[in-house]
Image (spheres, helix red, strand yellow):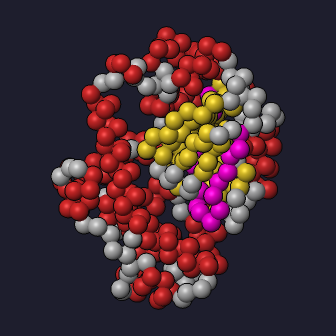
Amino acid sequence: MHPGLFDGGEAMLWRSAGVRWRQLFGDFSRLGVSFEWHELRADQEVDWAPSFHPDSVELCLNLSGAGEVRLGDTSLHLQSGTAGFYRQGRETFDARRVSGQAHHFITVEFSRPFLSGHLSGCRSALHPVVRDSLDHGVDRSALGAVEPLGPRHRDLVASLHQPPVLAAAQGVWYQAKAVELMGEFFFQPPADEELFCHRQQKVARSRVEMVMTLLKRDLTRPPTLEQLGKEVGCSPFYLSRTFSKETGATIPQFIRRLRLEWAGDLLREGRLNVTEVALEVGYSSLSHFSHAFHQQFGCCPGLYPTATATQRASLRPGEERDRRRGG
């Protein structure tokens, strides 16, 4: 974000790109931390870089939609249900949001004084990008790390929209959440002291990523849980529990979401009618498809190409997740 955008300039910037933007809490220049909500669906790629605040470390809680932050030959890829951070210095990032997708994400911006005030006593355990920000300032831009958003992270993100405290206490509550997020994402154990639980977490995340890749190969005929277990090297029962823990959704719910997102893409293209789209994405029953589609997107598939901007904008990610679970 450029200097001065907190006086309303950022809202104007995002509106010009078709983005719904709302500051949830904070004042970067005064408090050193800011929470911001972003929601968009664009027909073309959206340049995301102008929103980055100079001299900050920014954490993106990416609920849906794919984005990329590039610096030279390196990139940080944010997929749906992930969180990643980066440091904005003198060098400008090339940051893009993928076209044709629904994007919902929260950014949390941390100033160097805010980071230093809370993290100075634990430099050795910090991620190198964060540690370098404390030791040498934030003049140099750098890319951090990406991690999946687990169920507890998703619950935290949902609470950021409506803090469960009195209005007078929200300033304290949001700053506590900022500290909690730093603890969740800005630390990494030293290579020679990696704890067993961290190794297990990495194995679990790797397995989940492999499962996602296998499922995306053919959504109409996905492999069975037993076949997936053999592919990734663990029991079906353990794999099912691991997948749900890491993603906040069961494997059938994940497949369902991907099918419906694929259906939405086909409907927007306009080459197939609703019945043809249902069959294409693996639904043999038109009524089941229509019911599932309405739960996912908030409108019937026939209205989706024309009503998506208003229908999807009114559906919050937390509600969408709850509906998927209920479906």
Name the residue rendered at 39%, 71% in the picture. Answer: 218
Name the residue rendered at 56%, 46% in the picture. Answer: 77
- Residue 60 higher or lower than 223, as above or below: above
Quadrant location of the C terminus in the rendered image = bottom left
Question: Which residue is outermost to the front?
Answer: 73
Name the residue rendered at 73%, 59% in the picture. Answer: 18
In the rendered structure, which segment of residues is drawn in magenta? 93-110
Name the residue rendered at 57%, 15% in the picture. Answer: 117
Quadrant location of the N terminus in the rendered image = top right
- Residue 115 higher or lower than 45, as above or below: above
Image x and y of residue 181, in percent: 49, 32
Foreground residue among 173 and 291: 291
Majority secondary structure in the magenta region: strand
Q: Say whether residue 104 is magenta.
A: yes
Q: Quadrant of residue 99?
A: bottom right
* Labels in figure, total: 0
Foreground residue among 319 and 202: 202
Foreground residue among 267 and 181: 267
Image x and y of residue 248, in percent: 36, 51
Left or right of 214? Residue 85 is right
Image x and y of residue 47, in percent: 73, 51
